[in-house]
Image (tube, rainbow, N blue to C red):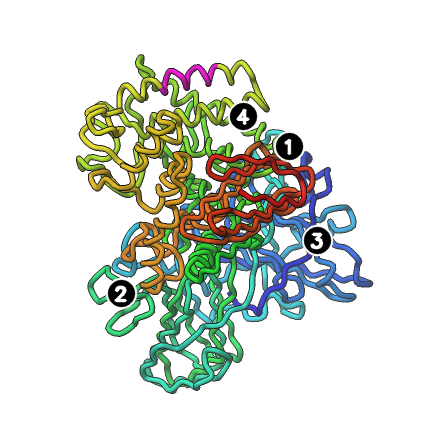
Amino acid sequence: MFFLLPGWGAPVRSANPELLDRWWTARWISVPNTSLFDYGVYHFRRTFDLAAKPSSCIIHVTADNRYQLFINGRRVVWGPARGDLLHWRYETVDLAPHLRAGRNVLAALVWNFAEYAPVAQVTNQTGFLLQGDTEAERAVDTGKLWRCIRNEAYRPLPVAPGQISGYYCVGPGDRVDGPLYPWGWELADYDDSQWKPARVDGPGGPKDGRNDPLNRWRLEPRPIPFMEESPERFASLRRATGITVPSAFPGQPAPVVFPANTKSTLLLDQSCLTTAYPELLVSGGKGAAISIRYAEKLRDPGKRAAGNRNQIEGKQLAGNEDLFLAEGGPHRLFRPLWWRTYRYIELNVATGSEPLTLEDLRGVYTGYPLVRRAKFDAGSEDLERILTTGWRTMRLCAHETYMDCPYYEQLQYTGDARPQAVASYYMSGDGRLARNAIEQLDATRAGDQPSFCRAPSHLPLYIPSFSLWWVGMVYDYWMYQDDAAFVKRMLPGVRATLSFFSARQRDDRLLGPLPWWNFIDWVRTARGGGFVGPDGSSAVHDLQMLLCYDWAARMEEALGSRALAQEYRQAAGGLRAAIRSAYFDPSKSLFADTREKAGSSQHANALAVLAGVSAGEEARGLIQRTLEDPSLAPASIFFRYYVNSAMVAAGSGDRYLERLDPYHTMLTAGLTTWTESGGVEARSDCHAWGAQPNIELFRTVLGVDSAAPGFRRLVIRPHLGKLSQVSGAVPHPRGEVRVSLRLREGRLEADVNLPGGIEGEFIWKDARRALAPGENRLVF
């Protein structure tokens, strides 16, 4: 993309109510004589005159696949926020701050990645739609007065074999041929007389509008805020070959001149992983080819090993790529259509007969606008580094959806999103992205099937265990966000999910073989065969089902059907007994993974505690064996979320701080985010399911947790381990929970401040004290 730093239009809370259930006056438009289904990048313009600058000019805008909208040369909004065809999002902004008396131009860039599209990108066909909010703004509705062209400068640059190892599905790079680019197309004085009138299709149709074959996209307002964008500069130039670089670069803009007929390489280090739009500003250099490659880390040649992320000696960069071909003009700015993930960037420049001047290379960070409201202070630099690194990991895996990883997939998987959502509640209190995730996953259910394991996704994929974790996401939202009406709306999905699995229970109440990918965790059980036996038996699946019965019963009792709640409780009672009978191995005092009892895992035994199959002193002993018995298949960093929760439930929460070794190891290896596996050598350097300390330092160590739906009552049960003091704050729907704890001569002193109207309980060892709204001072 070619433009300067962005400025969002003024966001607007809601649309004209007429647009929510009636056909729009604006029409979908596209470029004549082009395929609606193939790869293409397109420009649309609409010029108009104003007698005076208006005080308000509200519009609604969307496109398929993606768009960026400019007003008088300035980008004001981009989207649409990802969804599916039955929930196609549009953005609403007030353009008035960017309008002026006289001539104005609305200009849109629209692209369709077609067969190269990310798996997370749903599509129907190329199209662009802009609707004025009321009659006063409808002169700019998309229709026959808009003009358009296809931008012939763009070509897709798919990842080539060998560039990246492992599953990669985030879309292509951009190859942009500068001599073919219509420079200045977004400016009011650009001559578009040779552009074609737009091809006009059907009108915009709201999600709740009448059924009609023309309504290919069911429109609904964007449910999440606009993404954050902030400039950032590279920390250092780590390597340069074939060129002399000014010392000020890249910390600040400084011209770097690449002589004619030369080849040069620059390796730039951001110092930490980021998700950003790189911006390359060049002048001259007609015929020069500029390649930009992106990587999370450097690797040893011919190997997958990366080692310490700070070290570059003897290592090389392999990764996705953009390519810009210069046409020799001044101040040409290349910016890719989609953001990139990188710590390292390698710039390869091959000049032709003219020298090229690199005026600047910088980035614009982008991500969901999470705001850190939580505070934690234990006087430990190590714990603060873990929190900060987890916060960065969370942020890089949160954009228009939660993402498993920002580099390889950018897909919102339920297994990843559940701990990501809880981390969002604890760190920011913001539940909007979690609500969006719950809705998007629920929308994938069809007929008698459960939800996909990821959404949005144009390729169906089912993981049974993830469909069950979706019920957990709804329950978590109910407990931490004060939004009972939304949870009630999700109950039909909860019922459908339980119905799917209950239909696959055998006469002994245990689940039989489940279809699709029976993924549990990225580890193998002790017998090497996974978590599912030859007969389809799986303790983990049955225990998840039991948890879902318990969660659903509580939600139905409060918000839905009490009769159904009772039915779920009865089913849970029978299943609880059946699980113990089928999987508990008294010779080992452990729960086995399958009926054969050939092996056990931390997974099954942790879930047995969480589901109440094991309780009291037995559970405490079970967790001790789970943590210490090397014969058990260990949980990866993903499933540690459940192991840690079980440890607390069994009364062993003081061991939590002893379990942070993987995080210390990753930090020692120069990682700035948490890896997919929790080890130094992993496919992905950024997986937010590992950001569990951003939950547990508050929920387990500081001890703050919800004890009632909507966080309307809370419990504080700290587990200090070897700490002698800790303080912090946790965001709450009604404000903030503040806690300060000090151990002095074996006595605990606690200061607790609760929001107005919120009560709770403080538990320390065997003592319990009531907590009232406002200030509480306790001594144990």
Query: SS at mark 3?
Result: helix
Query: Which residue was labeled with disc 2?
Result: 299
Magenta segment: does it hold 152? Answer: no
In this view, 448 is above or below 285: above
Mark 1 neighbour class, 10 Å CA radius: few under 14, some 14 to 19, many 20 or more = some
Distance between the Cα atoms at labels 1 and 4? Answer: 31 Å
Considering depth in this image, is 58 or 769 the residue closer to the camera?
A: 769
Distance between the Cα atoms at labels 4 and 2? Answer: 49 Å
Residue 316 appears in which quarter of the rendering?
bottom left
Residue 607 lies, in percent from the top left, at 36, 32
Task: Tell which tag, 4 or 3, sits nearer the viewer.
Answer: 4
Amino acid, disc 4: Met
Amino acid, disc 3: Val
Of all residues, the one furthest to the right in this rendering is 51
| Mark closer to the chain start, 4 or 3 | 3
Query: Which residue was labeled with disc 3?
Result: 140
Task: Tell which tag, 4 or 2, sits nearer the viewer.
Answer: 4
| Mark closer to the chain start, 4 or 2 | 2
Residue 766 lies, in percent from the top left, at 47, 34
Residue 121 lies, in percent from the top left, at 46, 46
Mark 3 neighbour class, 10 Å CA radius: few under 14, some 14 to 19, many 20 or more = some
Query: Which residue was labeled with disc 4?
Result: 555
Query: SS at mark 4?
Result: helix
The segment highlighted magenta reads: 567-576
